[in-house]
Image (cartoon, rainbow, N blue to C red):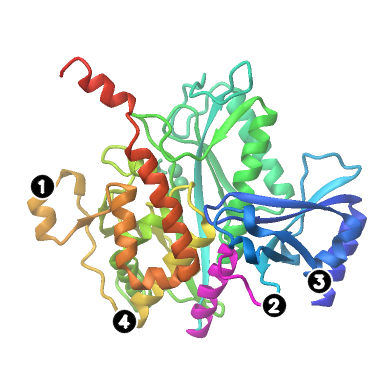
Amino acid sequence: DAAVKNEVISRARELGAKFIRLQFTDILGVLKNMAITVEQLEKALDGELMFDGSSIHGFTRIEESDMYLRPDPKTFAVFPWRPRDGAVARLMCDIYNPDGTPYAGCPRNTLKRVLAEAAEMGFTMNVGPELEFFLFHVDAEGRPTLRTHDKAGYFDLSPVDLGENARRAMVLTLEEMGFEIEASHHEVAPGQHEIDFKYADALDCADKIVTFKFVVRTIAQRHGLHATFMPKPVFGINGSGMHTNQSLFRGNENAFYDPYAPDGLSDIARYYIGGLMKHARAIAAVTNPTVNSYKRLVPGYEAPVYIAWSGRNRSPLIRIPAKRGMSTRIELRNPDPSCNPYLALAVCLAAGLDGIKNRIEPPAPCDRNIYEMTAAEREELGIGSLPASLEEALRELERDEVIRKALGEDVYAKFVEAKQKEWDNYRIQVHPWEVEEYLSKF
Ligand code: GLN
Ligand code: MG
Ligand code: MG
Ligand code: MG
């Protein structure tokens, strides 16, 4: 698109941008970038800039390490916290092979591929995430601690503390970068916050999640705080989730809405739920990809454990927010912010599409508190549970052809290899809990 390209170049010039960061994520969702000067921008937009992919996690073997970055001009944004003079801007990129084909190991390409499958069926996907995070103090050397002075809880209006100030600055910065912030509030745990931005099409949303985490960390640091998206940093209090509101659209119509259905949900919506529930155990490996993720998915902390859905209560995996019409959506509650959002949205969408293609009926909605049921009652109602560990989730992923196919063999193999290593590393450690529990007992 020559027009879009020229617009980016002239905007960069107008804003006096000197440096452009070409950004992408590795398989684990870690943001990477290569800085270029504005003089190189045109060449970059033409996809002519090369980098060595061999040292990026999950990218290529040494012998084929020359990769090309293809910036998406729609993602141009200036970093508001950097000097105005000689400003810094960024572009999100897709990774291409030297022969001009999309690199299969690129997470952004992976999401685009599944979105193209949805488009073939006539659908676009909209996503609205709710990211939670903790703000902790740093020690004298600037290293993160688990300390917070903040005693506030859910929606509390505490005397303005450091955390509140930082959150305010985060919201303002995100707005300057083109985010529409819908809500920002203190979460249940001390030091825990949530900032919600307006839903967007899935690719835009994944880009925004990556940007969001980067901005929140940066602004926290500038306030002398450490922001963490670790799913469960402290035992005994709530962890941090990334509730993922999702809907499919057909043109301008919300395909999840049916004004004639008693619950306002279309067949498409029901099958999408059926697909998500069928693949939930495998999806978890991607949406809850760390050892620590599974410390969050336990009873008692508002995080889901059981595979059920409900219009009303918040204990199940999937909740249907009350809004109908254009806002009709389902809220998937297990993802956490340690996931790679491109891969997470790709597997959710693939599961939903599988549900639609195969008309997978979900079980009846469950409006009771599942945590109060006995195992026998759950079994009778056919309510399964999410995996209890990363290892269990990886085993499920291995068995799930649909989710594997969504990732593609390349990403799948590299993801599982990295995660298996992570699990093995954890498994052989002796943890403080064990020493506490056994050292004097035996
Ligand atoms: N922090 C909770 C979780 O781990 C969610 C709390 C909420 O937003 N209701 O998912
Ligand atoms: Mg919320
Ligand atoms: Mg919340
Ligand atoms: Mg929510």
Helix, strand or loop at disc 4? loop
- If you read the primary sequence from the N terminus, does the residue marked by circle 2 or circle 3 appear first? 3
- In this rendering, position of residue 145 left or right of residue 267: right
The span from disc 3 to disc 1 (Cα, nearest Å) is 60 Å
Label 3 sits on what residue type? Answer: Asp
Q: Which residue is mark 1?
A: 374
Q: Position of residue 131 (x, y in %)?
A: 51, 46
* Foreground: disc 3 or disc 1: 3
Q: Which residue is mark 4?
A: 358
- If you read the primary sequence from the N terminus, does the residue marked by circle 4 or circle 2 appear first? 2
Helix, strand or loop at disc 2? loop
- If you read the primary sequence from the N terminus, does the residue marked by circle 2 or circle 1 appear first? 2
Q: Which residue is mark 3?
A: 46
Can residue 311 be seen in this snapshot? Answer: no
Q: Is residue 124 above or below residue 288?
A: below
What is the residue that sits farthest to the front in this orientation? Answer: 63
Q: Nearer the viewer, residue 124 or 404?
A: 404
102 drawn magenta? yes
* Foreground: disc 4 or disc 2: 2
